[in-house]
Image (tube, rainbow, N blue to C red):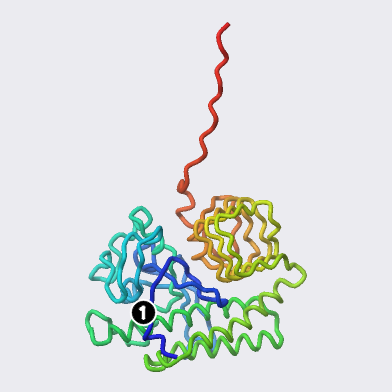
Amino acid sequence: MRLAAVPVRFVAVNFMIDGVGREVGGVGAENGGGVFGGETVRVDGPVAGGGGGRELRADCSRCAGVCCVAPAFTASADFAIDKPAGRPCPNLGADFRCGIHTELRQRGFPGCTVFDCFGAGQHLTQHTFAGRDWRADPATAQRMFDSFAVLRPLHELLWYLTEAVRLTPPGPLRDELTAALDETGRLTDGTPDDLLALDVDAHRDRANRLLSRAAEQARAGRAGPDRRGAMLIGTDLRRTPLTGANLRGACLIGADLRGVRLGAADLTGADLRGADLRGADLGECLFTHQSQLDAARGDHRTVLPPGLRRPSHWSLTLTPTRPQPRQRRPRPR
């Protein structure tokens, strides 16, 4: 199956896992280049290709701004403009950096601030195309953009499989996960022709079955309600038991999760755009990615999983507070 024939349209959701995935959108970094979201994540071992480290977080300083050109953007709450596939975003500079990166949210591009290509952008630029870019070598542009549509979901799988191996104790399942991780790593090192010939959906489906088993094993004895793929847009969940819930692929856009204890809930691919996580406890949640937190709202009381950072915009007032009722003054006697 050749994905190259299908133009990529991105919206501001960062996950394509579990068969309910949605395409993704954005330019990669609120910090205007460098490593997206903080510390670079590396995978060591056979998957690393030659023994080095596999980066699984975007480093825009070594990418040719592919995600600012390849996808189509649709004007929405996530993007201020319509942009056809293959046309550079007007905010993309000659140095492949975003010209408004410090004001993306204020200028109507919050979708850009929550996107992470999982390191696919720099791998595509530096490895797959050996440092060439679509401006200096226009003949490679379409192949580069088409290859990105395959390479990004592979890099996302690397992140999930790496997390699954970490969560899974030694045994047959861990061996299967490690084999899938190694195979996915080999696929990412393919040529453009190799990538465009790959049935990435079939490969992702096979890996997904392993990821589901890993999550079930990690939640054993703590499993809660099954809300996989549930449409919970704007739902008040403050009184809903969600400890250990299966929330894989759940649509939680704008959901009210204030003060909710999620325990070992599986958040694989859950859409948390605008979800209110103030005071929520996500400390033990499984497969939680930084981009999910970046897309949500929270505060200093929100408990985060280890290794994830508190988004800077959580300190901002994102929604108006409800006006307090006026106190009636006693009438003079």
Q: Which residue is mark 1?
A: 7
Which residue ends up furthest to the top in the rendered image?
333
Residue 249 screen position, x and y as percent: 57, 70
* Above or below, comparing residue 201 to residue 231 in the picture: below
Left or right for 76, reference 294: left
Which quadrant, please, contains the C terminus?
top right
Viewer-nearest residue: 188 or 307:
188
Residue 39 screen position, x and y as percent: 47, 68
Question: Total of numbered circles in the picture?
Answer: 1
Q: Residues within 10 Å of mark 1 (few under 14, many from 20)?
A: some
Which residue ends up furthest to the front in the rendered image?
231
Residue 316 screen position, x and y as percent: 45, 48
Q: Residue at x 66, y 75 (%)?
A: 215
Viewer-nearest residue: 199 or 40:
199
Which quadrant, please, contains the N terminus?
bottom left
Viewer-nearest residue: 4 or 162:
4
Q: Residue at x 33, y 59 (%)?
A: 80
Which residue ends up furthest to the right in the rendered image?
221
What amino acid is found at the position of numbered circle 1 in the picture? Pro
Q: Quadrant of residue 20?
A: bottom right
Left or right for 167, reference 135: right
Residue 146 screen position, x and y as percent: 36, 84
Q: Residue at x 54, y 68 (%)?
A: 289
* Above or below, comparing residue 60 to residue 106 in the picture: below
Secondary structure found at label 1: loop
Viewer-nearest residue: 283 or 242:
242
Q: Quadrant of residue 168?
A: bottom right
* Above or below, comparing residue 66 to residue 131 in the picture: above
